Amino acid sequence: MPKIGLLVCGSNASNTGALTAAAALKIITRCKDIAILSLPSLANQIPRQIALAKKIEKLIVVDGCHNECAKKILEGLGIKYDAYLNLEYDLKIMKSGPFTTLDYSEDDLTKVEEAIYKLCN
């Protein structure tokens, strides 16, 4: 069981959703005690995934935009989290809209990765 769980939007339908997914993959490559939880499984209330999310020592939620999808799913399940990052609110990376998956820079990716990394430590 990893010590830290990341629950990221990861939608890949927009630039900010893609950034959350790409940064999370970089983080788990960099840090061995961190894992990504399945947002679709939690949204579908899969009991095993809910149990895993509740067992994680530290849970970090990362949303790409003002819709706060990952956060709302956890709150709907009554699962508490330890830290929250929203790319629009906290990093001023604005969502470009639908179908903008690759509309971000390497600087944006580095900024998101570092912000998540700080929350993990």
Image (spheres, grey):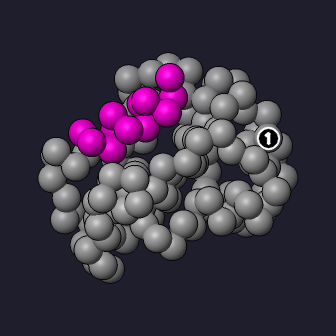
Q: Can residue 10 be seen in this view?
A: no
Q: Mark 1 points at which residue?
A: 54
The quadrant in which residue 117 appears is top left
Name the foreground residue: 38 vs 9: 9
Along the horizontal axis of the image, is 70 left or right of 12? right
Instruction: Tell me what residue is drawn at x 16 percent, y 45 percent.
Output: 107
Name the foreground residue: 14 vs 82: 82
Q: Is residue 31 above or below residue 35?
A: above
Q: Is residue 72 above or below residue 47?
A: below
In magenta, the rendered stretch is 110-121
Residue 28 % position (x, y): 45, 30
Q: In which quarter of the image is the N terminus?
A: top right
Membership of 38 in magenta stretch:
no
Residue 85 % position (x, y): 48, 49
Along the horizontal axis of the image, is 112 left or right of 55? left
The quadrant in which residue 77 appears is bottom right
Q: Is residue 41 above or below residue 34?
A: below
Q: Can residue 38 be seen in this view?
A: yes
Instruction: Tell me what residue is drawn at x 66 percent, y 32 percent.
Output: 58
Membership of 112 in magenta stretch:
yes
Residue 63 % position (x, y): 48, 58
Dominant secondary structure (helix, strand or loop) of the stretch shown in magenta: helix
- Secondary structure at numbered mark 1: helix
Instruction: Tell me what residue is drawn at x 73 percent, y 60 percent.
Output: 75
Instruction: Tell me what residue is drawn at x 66 percent, y 66 percent.
Output: 72
Q: How many residues crowd around disc 1 within 10 Å: few (fewer than 14), some, or many (20 or more)? A: some
Residue 36 % position (x, y): 55, 40
- Amino acid found under the numbered disc labelled 1: Lys
